[in-house]
Image (tube, rainbow, N blue to C red):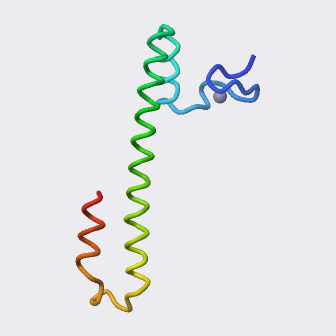
Amino acid sequence: MGCKICGRGSCTESFHSLPEQEQYSKYEAMSDNALISECVDKDNEIAELNTRVCELEKALDKLTDVAAECDSWESFPQGALDEALSVL
Ligand SMILES: [Zn+2]
């Protein structure tokens, strides 16, 4: 029988991080309905994080575009920095 967390034959639970082991125990103890709710929550959380990653990527792209046009730190426009920081 393989690892109950990942199913691999060459693995055991203790190879996984403590947070992973704790998460597994938490999910294992849940009813099907509680588990489904948890999945929906996680899916929403993932969708929100993906949106956030996209916003941050766009801000970083803009900032690196400005940086590519600049030949010195002194000439770097403050507005571009403020705009990037406003996304954080
Ligand atoms: Zn494993």
The residue lying toward the viewer, choosing from 63 and 8, is 63
Q: Position of residue 43 (x, y in %)?
A: 47, 31
Residue that extends furthest to the top in the rendered view of this protein: 31
* Whether residue 14 is situated above or below residue 76 in the rendered picture: above
* Whether residue 31 is situated above or below residue 85 in the rendered picture: above
Q: Position of residue 59 (x, y in %)?
A: 37, 65
Q: Is the N terminus in the top left, top right, bottom left or bottom right quadrant?
A: top right
Q: Residue at x 44, y 39 (%)?
A: 47
The residue lying toward the viewer, choosing from 22 and 59, is 59
Q: In the shown orientation, is residue 70 left or right of residue 83?
A: right
- Which image quadrant is residue 34 in? top left
* Whether residue 30 is situated above or below residue 24 in the rendered picture: above
Q: Residue at x 40, y 35 (%)?
A: 45
- Which image quadrant is residue 65 in? bottom left
Q: In the shown orientation, is residue 59 left or right of residue 13?
A: left
Q: Position of residue 37 (x, y in %)?
A: 43, 18
Q: Position of residue 35 (x, y in %)?
A: 48, 16
Q: Residue at x 30, y 66 (%)?
A: 84
Q: Is the C terminus in the top left, top right, bottom left or bottom right quadrant?
A: bottom left
Quadrant holding ligand 1? Answer: top right
